[in-house]
Amino acid sequence: MNAAHRNIAHWEERVDLAAAFRWTARLDMHEAVANHFSLAVNEDGTKFLMNPFARHFARMKASELLLLDANDPKTLDRPGAPDPTAWGLHGAIHRNCPHARCVMHVHSIHATVLASLADSRLPPIDQNTAMFFNRCVVDESFGGMAFDSEGERCSRLMSDPKVKTMIMGNHGVLVVGDTVADTFNRLYYFERAAETYIRALQTGRPLRVLSDEVAEKTAREWEDYPSTAEHFLAEIRTMLDADGADYAN
């Protein structure tokens, strides 16, 4: 790391976010140069870091992340403007949902398959799927790409602080959290849960669905379980460092 980078505002938050981008690419949960992550860096959540336009997740660097203001209507008119759909979606959420400190949106395969089903709910068939029991919202009103009006509509679906995951019908998935570690952990587990469910459906055999009581108990147990999210992100950074990755530049 260049010593000068240490003086860039919100440096550790930038490094965490860059690491999450890199690991998302390694897990093949990204899509070309689309999809976007953001992280609020002020108290009311309106100023946030986000990936620059058309930069591949596998090349993301901490120093290159954009610092944006959700209340700046001139953002897309400035040089180096972000992806307009990223601005429409993330700008609206950071403007309207101060509890959503970190926002991650991808079109990962299994989450998107789930979002393409007529019934996009995720039933609790194991302890990972149970993590999301009664803690997801399904957007059933896809209206096109997430420019301003669509982004505002989606942000209203995330107004309840208890809702941390939005299954975006005909689109993908969006997760929010308190930190990069918390949010990436949730994104990772949602994709795993969606894959388990999709693969179970592919067998054509009846599903062993947990009762509502056991599913809710398990979801609460997840919430009470000693958090591994920070450890997961720390391990990701250690593995990236061992490989000589330049994400922290």
Image (cartoon, grey):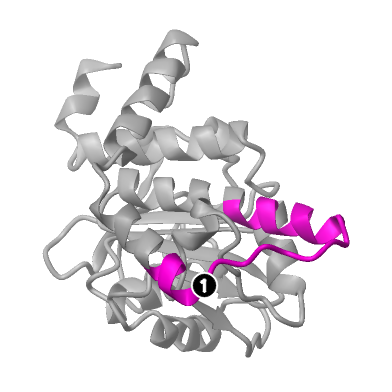
Disc 1 marks which residue? Answer: 211
Direction from residue 155 to residue 178 in the image, left or right:
left
Residue 201 drawn in magenta: yes
Element type at mark 1: loop
Direction from residue 161 to residue 235 in the image, left or right:
right
Image point 51% across, 33% down: which residue? 22
Image point 27% across, 50% down: which residue? 179
Q: Position of residue 106 (x, y in %)?
A: 58, 57
Image point 26% across, 42% down: which residue? 227
Q: Position of residue 81 (x, y in %)?
A: 46, 60
Residue 228, compared with residue 241, is above or below; it is below
- Residue 191 or 220: which is nearer the viewer? 220
- Residue 17 or 203: which is nearer the viewer? 203
Q: Position of residue 100 (x, y in %)?
A: 29, 67
Q: Is residue 108 visible?
A: no
Residue that sits furthest to the left in the current view: 43
Residue 118 drawn in magenta: no
Disc 1 residue type (three-letter): Ser
Direction from residue 151 to residue 92 in the image, left or right:
left
Residue range highlighted in magenta: 193-216
Q: Is residue 226 visible?
A: yes
Quadrant occupied by the N terminus:
top left
Residue 60, compared with residue 185, is above or below; it is above
